Amino acid sequence: MKKSAEIVGLPIISINDGVEIGSVKSLVVNPEKGSVDFLTIEHEDWQVSVKAIPFKKVIGIGEYAVTVENINAVIDLNEIPIANALVNKKIRINDTRIMSRKGQLIGEAKEYFVDDETGNIIGILVAMKDSEKILESEQILTYGKDILIVQEGSAGHFKDSVEDLLPENKKEENLEFEETGSSDDLENIKNKQADLLKGKRVTKDILGVSGETLIPSGTILTAGDISKAQNEGPSVFVELTMNTQE
């Protein structure tokens, strides 16, 4: 689960090509589905047309980068009418007013939370006069450009923490992740990343967080090498993905 603000600005790394495609410019919300369907790309060479990545093409969203399999994940929105229509709707969620079906002003949306595997919006952070609460996405009837319409009685469904939106099994996984640094979701992402890098040649020395050479230039990557980089942390792994070739 990620805040929208945690995704915007992240570099987008093509694992297969070992290049940085660009950075996340914005999240494209599908108001009918209540999900993030595309990530638009900020790139200095792409000024004429809008490029994006379908959320389903994302392998993982980490602390330092969004990873995709290869550069073919990038699409030109001008060539995909449905995607282009979503962008033009300009559904932004953050800083929009929240109103009930009968016209009662509830508060203002200050942030929203996204399932980083599916792109589904899980909930929103609601700022009211003297407090902030979390509202589950099931209470939202309409994602509008300027206003979110919610169910009558939504105030009775406010949560104190975004963790309260997760089912019990997800809460347990999150607790395990916090305590041990591992989870099934994280392992799945790591395995996908390892499969794409395995057998590639490293083009420069990859240094560990303490400055020592972790993987020498010229190394043909094995699962063990990739695991070492992953365990060193996101910045080291991103450096590895940026400096490999077939």
Image: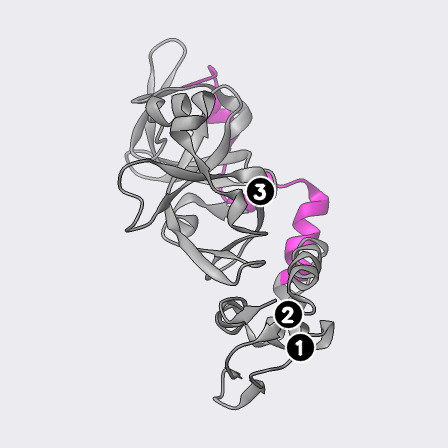
Q: Residue visible at 57% across and 42% down?
A: 57
* Residue 40: quarter of image: top left
Q: Are marks 1 and 2 in contact (CB under 8 Å)?
A: yes
Q: Is residue 140 left or right of residue 230?
A: left
Q: Which three-letter amino acid code belongs to the residue tagged 1?
A: Ile
Q: Which three-letter amino acid code belongs to the residue tagged 2?
A: Lys
Q: Quadrant of the C terminus?
A: bottom right
Q: CA distance from mark 1 to mark 2?
A: 6 Å
Q: Earlier in the sequence, mark 3 or mark 1?
A: 3
Residue where numbered disc 1 is placed = 220
Residue where numbered disc 2 is placed = 200
Q: Are marks 3 and 2 in contact (CB under 8 Å)?
A: no
Q: CA distance from mark 3 to mark 2?
A: 21 Å
**Residue 4 percent coordinates (x, y):** 42, 44
Q: Secondary structure at mark 1?
A: loop
Question: In the displayed structure, would residue 87 be above or below residue 238?
Answer: above
Q: Secondary structure at mark 3?
A: helix
